[in-house]
């Protein structure tokens, strides 16, 4: 488009004026504000375009940061990154503001009395190291707990540190996210697969909303499937943002297992499954057939409130479209961490997909490939060995929680472990368990008793407020992390790298923090390398140079899924396990069986269900003003209530309602809608911050965790996040 | 000639707000000011229910009431059809806000002027698509040349039977929507927000340029009321969170 084609154009000066006066999004912090931004615009320098990885959620999409005069002025999606292919969700833009956020921590803090006082890094390292040494000497290394949302940098440095001190006490956020999914799929098909929705003819989602908990590749996959005329069925108590893209089948929350058992039964009775695949690639099918024979669609209708005819239709459609049919492996949704039966639901998801003969078939599920990365030369960089002890929280321990993966643990149990004196010190990175696991007071009371609590964060979260030491990190745009694996149909690597210098010079990334503490504990020899040296070693076998990765942000390695070929499964038999010995040995039913949810709302009560909204990632984004502005403008914090139930209770749209569980009572405005199962109340996750220094999110909205009593599912160790009945009245 | 337009397929939109945020970011807007807003429409009774979200922004009308109503000529249309605001001429009188049937114009308080979607004309000059199109994960937006019969947008407008919304105002908008749910009277009011106040002004204004001389008491009253309503709306929103 030539300029002379148009009668008028905005002059450069006019544009500058516009920019200068309206410039606030990425120029929100006054000291780096309007004038600075305008100055950046006035220079003739072209913006530097630096690829890195987003931190709006944990999917780590590729972004390109536009940097002028040391300031980020815009971000775009990296078209080379397979997860987002140039697109970005709302959270990415919000997250880009984190660097300039006013609530950021700028210096290490130590709690003295009830106050935090600034200290030097040297003092922090020295005091933390001394305290850790004392605790280890007195109570043993297992009493030191490391908790995180596991990403490559936290896994490498955090786990290496824990190995170095001889502790296996590592917990990830999975018990309040998707641990049950992983356990159920591991013990049926060996691993959590991915879904080739783009090529599927039939896609069944069980409680997963790819349009609410957005991972761009998942949403794009659904859309491609829709474009290819796939039949899309969304089973969910709530008509989610994904439901419009297909057919909504509302279900009584917590009963997905009954639906899947009835689908299995119907497929078997009618021969709507891949009999040859089952014969050749599975064990225990006869026992399974016998077990599910009583789970008729009519039986399931009474439990799920889904008409028997609809259940038969789903079973038939799945069977007809096989192997290009799939049940999505989901995320948190219905079987990640919410119910006592979630792991069994996940097992059924694995087994039904197997019955469709769709493993590594186009339009089915597939087992992602990972890149083969290198490692540091242990002659030059001594590596601590993994301690041979039991996990302190009982994960993977016979007689306790034998099926819970010991590399994940159960973070929601830590307050009780502290209370019992089993855990004495807690180091937290990239995680906020005080707000994001059930029961605020149980959490506060527990963590308060810790002899040492260290929190690494960018701001004063609820967990940080309780800490003895708060160690400030630079934001993701100000730090370089370690090379990350990209798994999928094709494997690859990606890098998060510093795109601007640190705004607050006295912040340090987690890799440096851990190294600093380790040195003070005479464990520095395990950390005698720089991130750059580590990245070089990791990349060595890939043939991708560090420089190339830094320029593109992402690189493809040679591994690729072989579609059409059934791989050896990572179950103990190497086959699909309809009968699971490990379950039997652990004292659980070896063949999946119906198990009702632990809590059944009485007449008049509601089950409190909750989930993600696509503008937020739980509490980690609620404090971002740009994203909270969307929440406030569209009243996204409201609770959802069925219109008929609301009418019965005399509640109108926009009214204030009071939600009560035995643990907590909170008031919130209500969205009255036909898009929800009558006996369910939906709350968005992520609001209800109670850390007073989170100035944007403090005391706004409700957090589902406040209503939920801390409990643990014995099979997969989940936090039973929707096992709660509430009463509702006009507030 | 090039004549830019957009298709928004609401059957693909998942109401994720990414377009709004990408637009705010590239235009460096104030946190609570956005050039794209959303209207949600739910239809049906449980369990047979559908919902639709319409992202609304400047429609770059060919017969743009904002251009006609602008007393200083700050609002103008380029030959490629993009409607822009020349800020050196804008006096912040807000007549254009009142004139726009789509509620697409935003008062930027810090600047005391009015702005709106500019189809990212600067991105177009670099060969890029508008930010909202680039960021959209479910590919609900298609941008292109309405004068080129072979352009993707023209092909898809025909294929998907996309149509402008609020066409009764006869402003010849250049954003075409794919809807499953018919945009009913109530939704139109939601979109416009201030329809009852506006309609009186729009109808006579549609055919004439409203000069500064017309900006008498009556018009001032309308503008003031409109702004007051909007402020009240915002205030109500603030009270939602106990």
Image: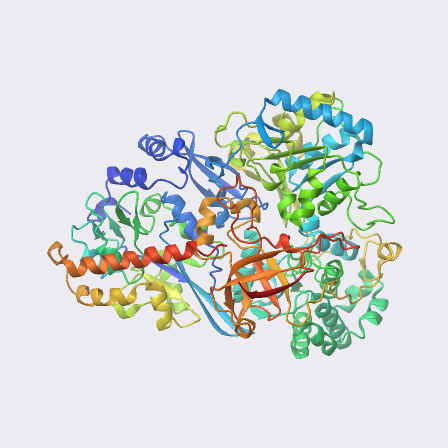
- Residue sitting at the far left: B213
Can you give x and y, in whole percent of width and height, for residue A642 in the image?
A: 55, 70
A532, above or below A83, in the image: above
Nearest to the observer: residue A409 or residue B7: A409
The quarter of the rendered structure image containing the N terminus of chain B is bottom left
- The residue under the point 54% across, 52% down is A216
Numbered marks: total: 0
Can you give x and y, in whole percent of width and height, for residue A544 in the image?
A: 60, 34
Relative placement, left or right, of A727 versus A168 is: left
Query: Where on the picture, by quarter, is residue B59?
Result: bottom left
Can you give x and y, in whole percent of width and height, for residue A186 in the image?
A: 76, 53
Relative placement, left or right, of A472 versus B28 is: right
Query: Where on the picture, by quarter, is residue A607?
Result: bottom right
Nearest to the observer: residue B8 or residue B189: B189
* Colouring method of the image: rainbow
- Would you say residue A370 is visible in this rendering? no
Can you give x and y, in whole percent of width and height, for residue A239 in the image?
A: 55, 66
């Amino acid at each position: 488009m030539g300029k002379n084609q148009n009668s008028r154009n905005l002059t450069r000066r006019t544009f500058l004026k516009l920019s200068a006066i309206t410039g606030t999004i990425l120029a929100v912090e006054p000291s780096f504000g309007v004038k600075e931004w305008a100055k950046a615009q006035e220079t003739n320098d072209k913006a530097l375009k630096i690829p890195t990885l987003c931190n709006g959620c944990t999917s780590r999409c590729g972004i390109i940061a536009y940097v002028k005069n040391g300031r980020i002025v815009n971000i775009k999606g990296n078209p080379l990154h397979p997860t987002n292919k140039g697109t970005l969700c709302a959270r990415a833009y919000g997250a880009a503001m984190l660097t300039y956020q006013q609530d950021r921590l700028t210096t290490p803090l130590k709690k003295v009395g009830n106050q935090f006082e600034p200290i030097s890094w040297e003092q922090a390292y020295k005091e933390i190291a001394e305290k850790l040494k004392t605790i280890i000497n007195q109570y043993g290394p297992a009493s030191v707990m490391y908790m995180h949302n596991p990403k490559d940098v936290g896994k490498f440095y955090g786990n290496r540190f824990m190995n170095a001190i001889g502790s296996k006490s590592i917990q990830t956020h999975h018990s309040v996210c998707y641990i049950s999914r992983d356990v159920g799929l591991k013990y049926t098909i060996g691993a959590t697969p991915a879904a080739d929705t783009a090529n599927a003819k039939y896609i069944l989602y069980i409680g997963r909303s790819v349009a609410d908990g957005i991972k761009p590749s998942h949403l794009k996959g659904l859309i491609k499937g829709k474009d290819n005329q796939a039949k899309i069925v969304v089973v969910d108590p709530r008509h989610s943002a994904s439901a419009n893209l297909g057919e909504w089948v509302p279900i009584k929350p917590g009963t997905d297992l009954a639906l899947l058992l009835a689908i299995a039964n119907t497929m078997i009775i009618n021969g709507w499954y891949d009999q040859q695949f089952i014969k050749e690639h599975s064990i225990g099918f006869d026992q399974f057939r016998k077990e599910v024979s009583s789970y008729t669609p009519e039986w399931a209708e009474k439990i799920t409130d889904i008409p028997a005819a609809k259940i038969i239709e789903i079973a038939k459609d799945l069977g007809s479209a096989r192997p290009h049919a799939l049940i999505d492996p989901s995320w948190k949704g219905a079987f990640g961490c919410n119910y006592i039966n979630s792991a069994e639901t996940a097992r059924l998801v694995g087994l039904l997909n197997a019955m469709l003969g769709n493993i590594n078939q186009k339009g089915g599920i597939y087992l992602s490939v990972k890149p083969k990365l290198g490692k540091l030369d242990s002659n030059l960089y001594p590596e601590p060995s993994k301690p041979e002890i039991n996990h302190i929280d009982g994960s993977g321990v016979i007689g306790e929680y034998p099926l819970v993966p010991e590399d994940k643990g159960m973070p929601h149990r830590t307050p009780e472990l502290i209370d019992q004196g089993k855990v004495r010190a807690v180091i937290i990175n990239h995680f906020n368990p005080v707000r994001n696991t059930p029961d605020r007071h149980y959490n506060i009371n527990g963590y308060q008793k810790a002899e040492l609590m260290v929190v690494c964060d960018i701001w004063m979260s609820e967990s940080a407020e309780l800490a003895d030491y708060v160690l400030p990190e630079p934001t993701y745009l100000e730090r370089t992390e370690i090379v990350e694996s990209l798994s999928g149909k094709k494997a690859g690597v990606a890098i998060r790298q510093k795109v601007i210098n640190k705004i607050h010079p006295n912040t340090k990334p987690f890799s440096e923090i851990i190294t600093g503490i380790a040195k003070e504990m005479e464990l520095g020899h395990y950390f005698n390398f720089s991130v750059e040296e580590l990245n070089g070693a990791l990349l060595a076998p890939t043939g991708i140079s560090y420089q190339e990765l830094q320029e593109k942000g992402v690189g493809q390695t040679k591994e690729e899924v072989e579609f059409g070929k059934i791989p050896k499964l990572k179950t103990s038999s190497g086959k699909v396990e309809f009968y699971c010995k490990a379950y039997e040995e652990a004292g659980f039913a070896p063949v999946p069986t119906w198990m009702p949810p632990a809590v059944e709302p009485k007449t008049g009560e509601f089950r409190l269900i909750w989930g993600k909204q696509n503008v937020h990632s739980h509490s980690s984004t609620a404090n971002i003003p740009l994203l909270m502005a969307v929440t406030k403008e569209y009243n996204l914090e409201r609770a959802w209530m069925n219109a008929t139930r609301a009418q019965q209770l005399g509640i109108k749209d926009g009214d204030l309602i009071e939600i009560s569980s035995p643990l907590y009572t909170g008031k919130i405005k209500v969205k009255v809608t036909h898009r929800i199962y009558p006996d369910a109340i939906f709350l968005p996750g992520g609001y209800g911050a109670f850390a007073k220094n989170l100035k944007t999110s403090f005391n706004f909205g409700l957090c589902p965790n406040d209503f939920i009593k801390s409990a643990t599912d014995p099979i997969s160790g989940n936090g039973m996040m929707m096992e709660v009945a509430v009463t509702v009245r006009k507030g | 000639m090039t004549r830019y337009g957009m298709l928004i397929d609401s059957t693909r939109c998942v109401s994720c707000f990414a377009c709004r945020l990408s637009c705010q970011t590239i235009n460096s807007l104030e946190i609570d000011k956005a050039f794209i807003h959303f209207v949600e429409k739910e239809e049906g009774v449980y369990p047979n229910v559908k919902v639709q979200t319409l992202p609304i922004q400047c429609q770059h009308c060919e017969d743009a009431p904002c251009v006609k109503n602008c007393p200083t000529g700050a609002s103008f249309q380029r030959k490629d059809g993009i409607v822009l605001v020349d800020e050196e001429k804008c006096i912040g009188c807000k007549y254009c806000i009142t004139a726009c049937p789509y509620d697409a114009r935003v008062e930027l308080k810090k600047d005391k002027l009015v702005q709106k979607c500019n189809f990212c004309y600067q991105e177009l000059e670099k060969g890029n698509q508008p930010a909202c199109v680039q960021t959209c994960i479910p590919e609900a937006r298609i941008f292109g040349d309405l004068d080129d019969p072979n352009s993707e947008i023209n092909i898809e407008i025909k294929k998907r039977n996309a149509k402008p919304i609020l066409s009764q105002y006869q402003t010849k908008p250049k954003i075409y929507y794919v809807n499953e749910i018919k945009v009913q009277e109530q939704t139109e009011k939601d979109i416009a927000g201030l329809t009852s106040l506006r309609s009186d002004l729009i109808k006579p204004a549609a055919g004439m340029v409203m000069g500064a001389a017309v900006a008498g008491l009556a018009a001032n009253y309308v503008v003031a009321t409109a702004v007051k309503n909007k402020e009240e709306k915002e205030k109500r929103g603030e009270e939602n969170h106990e």
